[in-house]
Amino acid sequence: MALISPRVIAQVSSSSASELAVMSWEWIMRADGQVFYRLTKVDGRRERNPWTLATRLPPAELEALRGDKSRAAEVLDVIARQHGHKIS
């Protein structure tokens, strides 16, 4: 996937741990409503992984979030948790 547009309205980091590894993830919400994530670290080693589309927000919900960055980050937290990630 190509480089993500700089029009990011929210960004959070998450982590997950198992018996095999501790992983860190980055989540972003774009102004067009797309939510992406990517693996950024495994056991502290930096990873360069492509962005993966997690979901696309409905236009009505997106319109309410565009002007409120803290609310957008809260929604992004919820989406990450729904995908099994713990927000750090």
Image (spheres, rainbow, N blue to C red):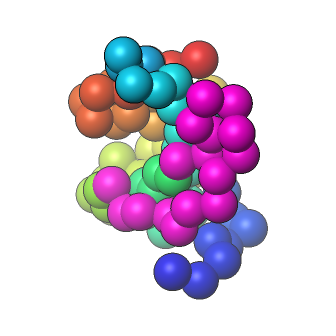
Q: How many numbered circles are shown? A: 0
The residue at 62%/46% (across/down) is 40
Judge from the rendering whether residue 82 lies leftward or rightward of residue 53; answer left or right. Answer: left
The residue at 51%/52% (across/down) is 38
* Percent coordinates x, y for residue 85 in the rendering: 38, 27
Is 52 above or below relative to 81?
A: below
The residue at 74%/67% (across/down) is 6
The residue at 50%/64% (across/down) is 51
Magenta stretch: includes residue 25:
no
* Percent coordinates x, y for residue 70 in the rendering: 62, 27
Magenta stretch: includes residue 47:
yes
Residue 8 quadrant: bottom right
Q: Residue furthest front?
A: 20
Is 38 above or below relative to 22?
A: below
* Percent coordinates x, y for residue 88 in the rendering: 59, 17
* Percent coordinates x, y for residue 60 in the rendering: 32, 54
- Residues shaded magenta: 39-54
28 or 67: nearer the eye? 28
Q: Does residue 9 show up?
A: no
Residue 20 quadrant: top left
Q: Does residue 19 show up?
A: yes
Judge from the rendering whether residue 81 lies leftward or rightward of residue 40; answer left or right. Answer: left
Is 61 above or below relative to 24?
A: below
2 or 57: nearer the eye? 2
